[in-house]
Amino acid sequence: MIIITGAAGFIASNLVARLNSEGFRDLVLVDDFSRSDKQKNFSSHTYTQLVHRDDFAEWLRGHQRFAEFVFHLGARTDTTEFDHRVFEKLNLNYSKQVFEICTEFGIPLVYASSAACYGMGEHGYSDDDAVTPLLKPLNPYGESKLAFDKWVLAQEKKPYFWAGVRFFNVFGPNEYHKGRMASVVWHAYRQISETGKMRLFRSHKPGVADGNQQRDFIYVNDAVDVLLFFMLTRKNSGIYNLGTGVANTYRFLAESCFGAMSQAADIEFIDTPADIRNTYQYYTCADMNKLRLAGYNKAFTPLAEAIEHYLKDYLIPSKYL
């Protein structure tokens, strides 16, 4: 029995679909399943049981002997939410409870951390444990993820295998429900479809041209590949970056979206809002050496290829995975 929390969400629903395609059917999906706009993310998948997230800890204690692996991907991911209590409850304390139960009963665990831990990138983007205490996230979401990473590293007892995964900018199928927190690719598709144009933030940093701000964008298919690698190998516990190790510009992303939609690029630049201008990141790029040293050798999908696949196979026909 494989357990996936956040199963009605974006990355977790992609993981469930992949597990099904690999022949795994005994899956327990954990989430708050009340949102109608997330039903299609999991309704076509094969699973054994749905468990509400509020009941999960007690349920896991009662069913621990059947649990082979836990993917804890459920979290509050809104970077514009500034109520620390929300993140303390859902991202920190809830995750501690899951980790402690997995430790007690020897259940291997992979949990979702975030590249938001790196803040402005003052200390680079290395997932070396020595760097973690130095990091300074920019918002309560990032703070909650970093707090849990630091708590995990400080624990004397841990599951025999565990991995914390710092997702960078993930995009792909089943993110329709995310609204403003959806990927830039999703927003680009919507803007181009509705207006024929794509709006990007103007650069306010000397030496960086408009549209040349860079991010490490990773297709959700590649992210799921890494999650399965951890489940199948169960070696080298630790915190790992999950990006591609390549930074692409927003201009290239936008042009790739226009290309996938067979339209000429028409990009308009607008000022970065004043309230986020001082904390706006001009560059992120995951250091992927640790994952490679752990034995993961599969190549990541180039951005333009991933965008074409996503738009043509999912966004344009409005399909779910």
Image (spheres, helix red, strand yellow):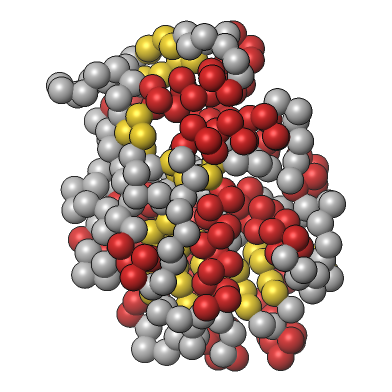
Figure quadrant of residue 241:
bottom left
Q: Nearer the viewer, residue 120 or 211?
A: 211
At a point 65% along the width and 58% down the height, the residue shown is 15
Q: Position of residue 160 (x, y in %)?
A: 49, 88
Please identify the quarter of the rendering in which residue 250 is found: top left
Question: Image check: 142 left or right of 118?
Answer: right
Quadrant of res 157: bottom left
Residue at 73% in and 56% down: 17
Question: Residue placed at 38% from the left, 22% from the top?
Answer: 251
Whether residue 119 is situated above or below residue 75 in the rendered picture: above
Question: What x and y, as percent, mark residue 150?
Answer: 33, 70
Instruction: State the quadrant of the N terminus.
Output: bottom right
Left or right of residue 4, residue 232 in this image: left
Residue 266 on image: x %, y %: 47, 8
Position above or below: 301 against 235: above
Which residue is depicted at the point 27% across and 53% down? Answer: 125
Residue closer to the observer: 208 or 233: 233
Q: Is residue 161 left or right of residue 135?
A: right
